[in-house]
Every structure is written in structure tokens, then in C-alpha cells.
Amino acid sequence: MRNILSTKEDNLMPLLIMANDPDLISGVIGIVLFILVFILSVAIYFTPTFIALVRKHPNGAPIFLVNFLLGWICIGWIIALIWSLTAIDEDRSYR
């Protein structure tokens, strides 16, 4: 007859069996890699917007719109990048 109180080994046994499953391990690695690639892709995609925000560019909102709406077309991303890197004229009033 089995003891009513189970040992720690009995409680951990399902986890040990799952940890040795190569399909589960490769699935978890795949999900983690997907998340990392997705985050890196979004960071690269919005680089022009980040640059404009850090530089406090007066045209930050239009740069974001060009980046967001046309960034998937490479020329739109390049235009937003160049625009975010343009000189900021402190003396000129933009509004």
C-alpha cells in the first residue's frame, strides 16, 4: 500500500518527464525565439520614430505617421529615417 503523504520526488516526476520531452523543449525554444525576433523587428521598424523622440524633433508626429503607415515600403522607412535625422532649427517657429 502506498503512503498517503507523497514525497517530493513523486510531485516532481511529471515535470521531469516533461523536461525530457524534446518536442516540448524545441517548442518552448521556438516560442522564445519568435518573441525575441518580433521585439527586435518592431524596434528596428520604429527606429526613425525613436530617433525623432530622442532628438525632440518638432515634426515627431508626422515622422511617426510616415514610419507607421509607409514604413513597410522600404522607401517610406528611409524617408522617415532621413527626416528624423534632419537638422532642427531652434530659431524657427514650427507652429
Image (cartoon, rainbow, N blue to C red):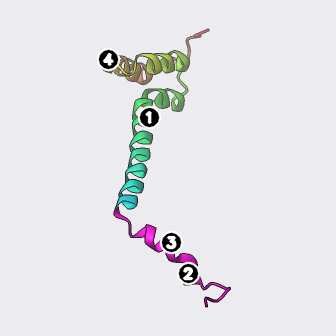
In this rendering, which labeled residue sits more in front, label 2 or label 4? 2
Residue identifier under label 3: 14
Describe the element under mark 3 as helix, strand or loop: helix
Q: Position of residue 34 (x, y in %)?
A: 40, 45
55 and 16: which is toward the camera: 16
User: From mark 3 to mark 1, how far is it between C-alphas?
Assistant: 37 Å
64 and 31: which is toward the camera: 31
**Left or right relative to 63: residue 37:** left
- Give the magenta part as a residue range: 1-22
The residue under label 3 is which amino acid type? Answer: Pro
For residue 75, which numbered disc appears in the image? 4
Local packing at callout 1 (Cα closer than 10 Å; few below 14, some 14-19, many 20+) is few
- Quarter of the image containing the C terminus? top right
User: From mark 2 to mark 4, how far is it between C-alphas?
Assistant: 60 Å
Describe the element under mark 4 as helix, strand or loop: helix
Say which residue appears at 37% left-offset and 17% top-offset. 76
User: From mark 4 to mark 3, how far is it between C-alphas?
Assistant: 53 Å
